[in-house]
Amino acid sequence: MASVSVRDLDVTFGHLKVLEKLNLEVEEGEFIVLLGPSGCGKSTLLNSVAGLLDITDGEIWIAGDNVTWKEPKDRHIGMVFQSYALYPRMTVEGNLSFGLKVARVPKDEIKRRIDGAASLLQIESLLKRRPSQLSGGQRQRVAIGRALVRDVNVFLFDEPLSNLDAKLRTELRVELKKLHHKLNSTMIYVTHDQIEALTLADRVAVMHGGVIQQLAPPKEIYRRPVNRFVAGFVGSPAMNFIEGTLVGGKGAPALRLPDGSEVVLAGYDFIDVPGEGRPAVLGVRPEQVELASSEANSGIFRIEVSLVDPMGADSLLWGSVGADTVSVRIGPDDDYKVGETVTGHFFPDHASVFDAATGARL
Amino acid sequence: MNNPATLSVAVASADVINERSGASAGPRGPRPKRRFSRRNIIIYGTLIVVALYYLLPLYVMVVTSLKGMPEIRVGNVFAPPIEITFEPWVKAWAEACTGLNCEGLSRGFWNSVRILIPSVILSIIIASINGYALANWRFKGADVFFTILIFGAFIPYQVMLYPIVILLRELGLYGSLTGLVMVHTIFGMPILTLLFRNYFTSLPQELFKAARVDGAGFWGIYLRIMVPMSLPIFVVAIILQVTGIWNDFLFGVVYTKPDLYPMTVQLNNIVNSVQGVKEYNVNMAATILTGAVPLIVYFISGKLFVRGIAAGAVKG
């Protein structure tokens, strides 16, 4: 168990600045997920923490120790890779014991630790097999076990579940979460899968363009995204964005759509008083919109239905508000006709409003 | 148009069409095999002709080496021996004269072995470590180093021949087997390093990272992770080096002295000797003996060799 602290980290590959002045504090026992699209620098950050690549500037501290220039082996970390990276010529047992043998741990201690990890991960029956004789899920368990036996301070996961099929991914995800509760160790987990991020993390760091956009607990990431990128990246189906201009000042704020109609935003918690006529984007999640509830007088807009997608547990209604396309989550039995105009309602205090130019939350 | 050949071709192609349409209607029973289809005849015909073309010289050599001189003088090189004699083989191995020396090829054989074994082992060990360092440990200047090394592969040997003579002389190694081993090791370096580097690059990088996180160092990763995964490429390297060094003539003749000449040089001296009768049978036997080592290496490891060459292409 240990804290991890990344301070003013710069990483450049040639002329390409991958990370710039990046700061991240991970507390002891915390499960941090680095979430972002490919190329956002999340794996680079993880590799920097592991010591697998040379950083350009900045410092990395693990457990109160400056490890910036230390070899990976001296950082007391365990790492799990997307491709499992099991040593193909060794048995499962050999894979698990490799790090311990290198560290000259006594034989009976190695056996004790392997047995412990194997029973925790339910791979006891596989110990004599070779990686090629294992399924994907089993391989990833062994890879996790390899980090487990070494009694490390910090676990690093580099998209560990991305190579597995959907069912197995869910299973292992749940197991990982249980494992974290049991071990209570610090974990840093890289993924581009938002479900993994939201389910596993104590805090999620959403990354884009080498910058951490928002670092917050999953609920806050989902409910109060700090900018339009985070809002659009997290959530499936994605958040609806409706463009317009802000009118009415603090007293009676509303978003005026290009067609002249206004969406009243009474109750929305503005960070600062919006200027009159400021171009803005309203963000509403599909499940935050209710249809055909016209009693309220704020958060009302008209949707022209263009398509209904049944998805089993619920359906998704696609329509247009002015020039913008929106989706609304509806009951599986609700029936709407294409071309019909319906009224949508949401609670403005659950929605988000972003500056149209900077994308920052208002 | 009534040419029977055209007709049979037409029939054959009609058969092919029938076969295809039959297959699309739903195959039943084992797939029909046609051993003498046109395609097979052309393929195997070509292969047999080419194989014969390459085998014929070998045949002549074997046949001649088993004949006595009177039989050879009759003049038919393709005729099998009437009276098989192993005398030329014994003579080539143990009695043939080069210069003042009449020990046959055996001396050259053992010289070649003494050159071959250290050269192969040394060059492969060094080149595999080079390749591993270049592929996985991106040290500063690695690219420049690699470029220079590869450039070395394109410099003609003749340019370096004499400078190396001077170098070996200054080192006190000129004319010794140690000197020749050194030369072979150095000259094998560019191509072998390239071979190993490309192989190690094709292995998943995450394995290397995992081993580093597990605490293994430069040598630990090399010996425990990389080498066990690299059997095919080691086999390729061994074959390249064994055949290359065994067949070498130029370095052998330049950098050693007569009693240390490798087998190839000695073979040349036996075959090209101008005094006395040309003993074709002895020459043939000597040549086969000299070529036997690379041939045996190919026969034993041919499959592994092909697998190693292909290994870079397939991940797994």
Image (spheres, coloured by chain):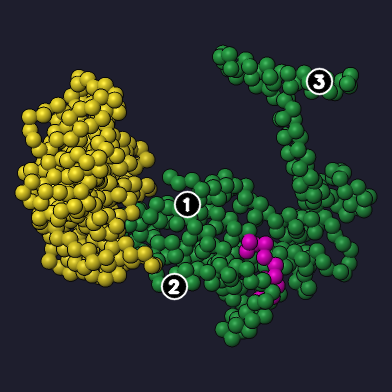
Rendering coords of residue B35 (x, y %): 70, 24
Query: Which residue shows up at 44% across the image and 65% down it?
Result: B134
Which tag, 2 or 3, sits closer to the chain's start? Answer: 3
The quarter of the picture where residue A78 lies is bottom left
Query: Which residue shows up at 49% across the image and 72% down it?
Result: B144
Please, which chain is the residue tagged with disc 1 on? B
For residue A45, above or below residue B181: above
Rendering coords of residue A192 (x, y %): 27, 46
Pointer 1 residue: B231
Quarter of the figure that contains the N terminus of chain A:
bottom left
Looking at the rendering, the stretch of residues picked out in magenta corresponds to B244-255
**Which chain does yellow denote in the image?**
A
For residue A88, above or below residue B2: below
Binning the other alpha carbons within 10 Å of mark 1 as few (below 14), some (14 to 19) or many (20 upward) gives few
Are discs 3 and 1 less than 8 Å apart at CB? no
Query: Which-is-in-front pick, marks 3 and 1?
Result: 3
Mark number for residue B141?
Answer: 2
Please, which chain is the residue tagged with disc 2 on? B
**Which chain does green denote in the image?**
B
The quarter of the picture where residue A42 lies is bottom left
Amino acid under disc 2: Gly
Amino acid under disc 3: Ser
Which tag, 3 or 1, sits closer to the chain's start? Answer: 3
Residue found farthest to the front: A260
Pointer 3 residue: B8
Which tag, 2 or 1, sits closer to the chain's start? Answer: 2
Please, which chain is the residue tagged with disc 3 on? B
Query: Which residue shows up at 75% across the image and 58% down it?
Result: B286
Instruction: Answer whether residue B68 is visible to the viewer in this image.
Output: yes
Question: Under tag 2, what secondary structure?
Answer: loop
For residue B45, above or below residue B284: above
